[in-house]
Image (tube, rainbow, N blue to C red):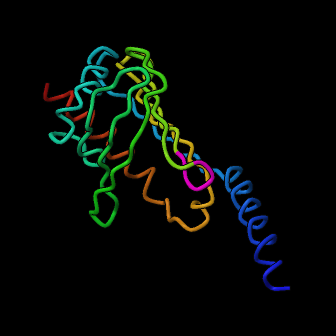
Amino acid sequence: MIWNLLKFGLPIVVLLAVAVGTQTRKTFHVEQVVEATPDEVWAVLMETSAYSDWNPVFVKVDGTYEDGVQVVNHVVDPDGKILEMTATVKTLSPRRQLRQTGGIPGIITFDHQWLLESVEVGTKVTQHEVDRGIYLWFWDSSWIEPAYASVNDALADRLRVD
């Protein structure tokens, strides 16, 4: 009886958990207007080799942003631990959008976008991310939006210097 329950019941429970997990989502959204043109903002975002000079969260990017290419983002969590996250560049629209996705479907996935919009005083810089998966039930993600806001602040500071 127990063997049959494990043999048939456990896979069903796992499949249900994964299915429900893919429907679980959290959205993160921060935006800021910076006094720079979309060209200037884009140039800083595309210079991945310089991220360690200015970016407090994405402290290193292995690779360059190109359509369809995989990069490894080195992200600092609130405890100071560096997480390596492999991402695939899904959209690269110069001066407008950089979209990267990655993760393990059903467990945890991310869809992160940088969106740039020309406004009268410069560029509205938006970071928008949707995470999905069962891991969201257990993960304290309260640090994500403040971290992304700090990245936008650091980007604005970088553009004032350059």
**Residue 120, above or below 32:** above
Answer with left or right where residue 27 lies relative to residue 158. right
- Residue at 64% of width from left, 50% of height from top? 25
Q: Residue furthest toward the right?
A: 1
The residue positioned 80% from the left and 85% from the top of the image is 2
Numbered label tally: 0
User: x, y (%) of residue 140?
Assistant: 50, 65
Which is more toward the observer, 129 or 70? 70
Above or below for 24 versus 123: below
Magenta residues, dominant SS class: loop
- What's the residue at 24%, 31% (across, down)? 48
> Bounds of the magenta span?
105-109
The quarter of the picture where residue 33 lies is top left
Where is residue 114 drawn, in percent x and y?
43, 30
Quarter of the image where the N terminus is located: bottom right
Q: Is residue 107 magenta?
A: yes
Quadrant in which residue 137 is drawn: bottom right
